[in-house]
Amino acid sequence: MSSFDAHRYRAEFPNLRINVHGKPLVYLDNAATTLKPRCVVDAVNAYYVTGVSNVHRGVHFLSEQATAAFEYSRQVVRQFLHAPKAHEIIFTKGATESLNLVAQSFGRQFLKKGDEIIISYMEHHSNIVPWQMLCEQAGCVLKVIPINERGEIIFEEYLKLLSRKTRLVAVVWVSNSLGTVNPIKAVIDQAHRRGAVVVIDAAQGVTHAPTNVQELDCDFLAFSGHKVLGPTGVGVLYGKEKWLEAMPPYQGGGDMIKSVTFSKTLYNALPYKFEAGTPPIAEVIGLRSALEFLQTINWEGMKAYKQELLDYGTQKLLSIDGVRLIGTARDKTSILSFVVDGIHPHDLGTIVDQDGVAIRTGHHCTQPVMEFFKVPATARASLAFYNTKEEIDVLAGAVVRAKEVFHA
Amino acid sequence: MREELYQQTILEHNRNPRNFKKLEGATHVAEGYNPLCGDHLWVYMKINGGVIEEASFEGSGCAISKASASMMTASLKGRTMAEAQVLFDEFHQLVIGELKPDERPHHLGKLAVFSGIWQYPARVKCASLGWHTMHGALEKTKSVSTE
């Protein structure tokens, strides 16, 4: 039994206090989006109530204050990722935009016809489609690392796919539909030996373990604010300075320029070159609070506690007749994807919702994974550090009730 | 309090779907697919002189989509194409909550069991999939998709 006190943290999440259909909310959909601690809500609120201003524009008090807060957030993100330089942190609207930025800006600049891009079978659609689009535009070839029955990438197959033609490898750190934790350090090292650039989708990874982009030595890393306790509408792209400097802007507009004339426009320096238009200011400020909140947590304790929840949930669900887990990787985060014999995941989702339990049902934007495991969809309980064993009991009880309804 | 979605009739049709087969000699066929949840079905009809002599479906999906398609095929048999169109319109209004079966005359019969589904917005598309597919078959559209 770990000494991690989930209840102490639960008090910080106002959303946990609501009732759903007359029952206390049991929120087990953290891989879709996490709940927000009060400090994040307060920070966003404070900006809108007393601090509204645009950034990098005015010389007035509010504008200078907002700009300072905005740029301080960049420092906090830099520390969170252990990035060498603050201007290597680009604010986007989410991990999806971060990945699209790399595909369009880096990809179209540096990849040419015949170059190969490697992704894995378990990628989220947001780390598949941008590369497919690039392949169509630039004539590159997409290669896919296969997975095994446990839902792990087959590393030997990855090594076989790597070649002189490999220009870029884009792989997810932690799978959102299977919970698999990929050996990204080894993935990165092998790619670098071949001179390929590596993009890490860290949307689920950044809450799983501390992120150190210098140790990983990844070239790019993307994550979303709303999956790390922060607001929706903000995401981050980390990129190595040498690449970001060499890349053309992703979008044109205000803030990303030094000067504009009709004959010649000079682009702004990093990171502003990639932040066209008014950024999500309130959200960036909220993200800072989220990351500061996370930094008050003992991550070793949190990791052990989530492992305990995962083990308990695994055992609890498997004790129910007809339940099958999808994703049984040896290194796994606290995500339980499962199917129940005789009950379609959507029916299951609706029935457990009646007991106040929020789980995700569907293909989780990973259709190839569903196809691999020959299921149309799964039910997914994704556990955060503020979840408890009692909540897993409520889920298990609701699954049993669904079986009774369906005589399954 | 929302109306119970999984009423006995629906559960029963899910367990024992009627006309759950490919129809040999069908004159009208369409495929329906909901990419969001993976529900995938085919609707077959044998139409003679404007009358639906037989209707069937096959495929896979959740209980709501299966029961809805099952009850639909049962209620289509013997109807004219024009009547099927009326039924399609009424069912559509029913599942979005615009038609209250107790408040005005309709032709829905047992299909009124879906009257509470508008309270489950995420599931409306499940109940509609078979119907949209049938509608596509009537109009000879090969494949329809609901999201």
Image (spheres, helix red, strand yellow):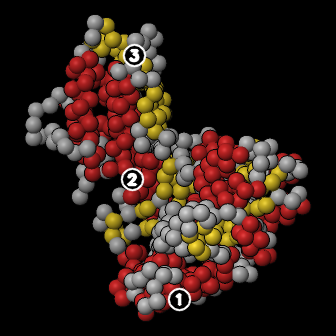
Residue linked to disc 3: B28
Q: Which of A275 and A43 lies nearest the eye of the viewer?
A: A275
Foreground mark, 1 or 2?
Answer: 1
In the depicted structure, whether residue A400 falls above or below residue A16:
above
Q: Which mark is residue A113?
A: none
Element carrying mark 2? helix
Residues under labels 1 and 3: Cα distance? 66 Å
Q: Secondary structure at mark 1?
A: helix
Mark 1, Cα crowd under 10 Å, few <14 / some 14-19 / many 20+, is: some
Residue linked to disc 1: A68
Q: Is residue A124 visible?
A: no
Disc 1 versus disc 2: distance between alpha carbons? 48 Å
Q: Nearer the viewer, residue A269 or A226?
A: A269
State left or right for residue A76 relative to residue B108: right
Which image quarter holds the N terminus of chain A?
Answer: bottom right
How far, Cα to Cα, is label 2 from label 3? 35 Å
**A354 on left or right of A91:** left
Up the image or down, B57 lies above or below A15; here it is above
Q: Are marks 1 and 2 on the same chain?
A: yes
Q: Which mark is residue A351?
A: 2
In the rendered view, tell whether residue A326 sits above or below residue B31: below
Furthest toward the bottom, the residue is A61
Rendered residue at 47%/18% (across/down)? B22
